[in-house]
Amino acid sequence: MNALLHTESNRIIELMEQPTERRDAGWLKDAVQQAILLELATLPPYLCGMWSIDDASGGDVLDAVHAIVFDEMSHLGLACNLLTTIGGAPRLADEGAVPKYPGPLPGGVRPELTVFLSGLTKDSLEMYSRIEEPDDPLAEAVASPTSIGAFYNAILDVFREHPELITGARQVVKIMAAGHGSGNDVVALDSPAAVESAIAVIKEQGEGTSASPENPHPGEVGELAHYYVFREIYRGHKLIKVSTDPDEWDFQGAEIPMPHALPMGIVPSGGWPREGPTAVDVDTRNLLDGFNTSYSAMLGFLEQAWQQDLPAKAKVLLGKAVGEMFGLQEPAQSLMRRALPDGSGNAYGPEFRYVAA
């Protein structure tokens, strides 16, 4: 296994510890690949939470989590364009690239955090918000290790030092759904300005800015950055400005009821057992294996899309990846309706395990 792709390594910490004078083209390619792994790692937990929400009671919470998932998909695409524009090739369809759950975020970011797969619960919302947490939140400030945003700041600094590395090669372009904000378009990164804009979108949609918790690239006016959306749902109240000069924000707004969710339990290490007294039944195993196969195929199509010199071929491959992605919801929710045999009242759920073709 390629050690640089191992999601349980401390590669990001190692990269951040390198002195700035040693951060060259090789450093940048390595760092952006790690950023791709980070973006990929957020999708499975957020998708499990979104798919578990009952459509009838989900309302604004379902819409909010859906918007965040949408954002994260575009961030993954932008990160892949960041790598190909400097001559790299994204790795996604690789056992080392695909995060294992429960486990850490790739690269050693926030080492105190364990990322897991489950339905939408208070515990999962706490975990989601810690993934997105800025270094200095404007509400509920806590001491925390270096954020994902700080890592992107380091990447941006190297792009600024070496603008000559930006070639615009193998750029996959995707105009996302209308009405969700121009920041969600996966655009060609063929200039320093385009790179600056892309990194700002990735950082600020997740963390907000030092001046405001609002998403500067929203689909709707007043949309908050991901961290604050998750804290709102967790706290059960909207975040509002409670004073000015200086601005202060607190969760004192309208109530946000916790929606009913399918009772997906936490996927155990290594996935649901295939052997022994608690082994899954044949039908459940088929659902799990089929989901993992489709997920792996999706990653393969994405990886191939960013290896294409011809935009038309890249577009076809991206379309195949999107098709596989939309096909994951039905088997995931079917699993969430299958009770675990332990009498806990919890249910199965997707494992998001990579299966080599």
Image (spheres, helix red, strand yellow):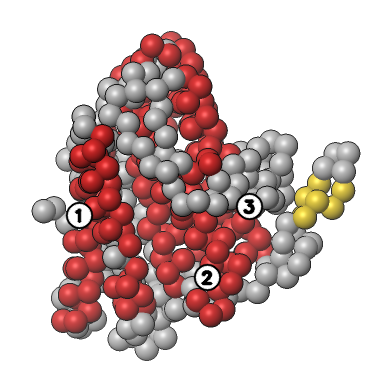
Which mark lies nearer to you, 2 or 3? 3
Answer few, some or many: residues within 10 Å of disc 2's Cα (few below 14, many 20 plus, some between 14 and 19).
many
Reading the image, the residue beneath label 3 is 220
Q: CA distance from mark 1 to mark 3?
A: 33 Å
Q: Nearer the viewer, mark 2 or mark 1?
A: 1
For the point 29% across and 73% down, which residue is it?
331
Please tell me whether mark 3 sits on a helix, a strand or a loop.
Answer: loop
Label 1 element class: helix
* Crowd rating for badge 1 (residues with CA inside 10 Å; few <14, some 14–19, many 20+): many
Residue 121 percent across, percent down from the top left: 52, 70
Q: Residue at 80% x, 51% y: name it.
A: 241
Tag 2 residue? 121
Q: Which residue is mark 1?
A: 297
Picture quarter containing residue 33?
Answer: top left
Real-space Cα distance between discs 2 and 3? 26 Å
Vertical position of residue 166 compared to residue 181: above or below: above
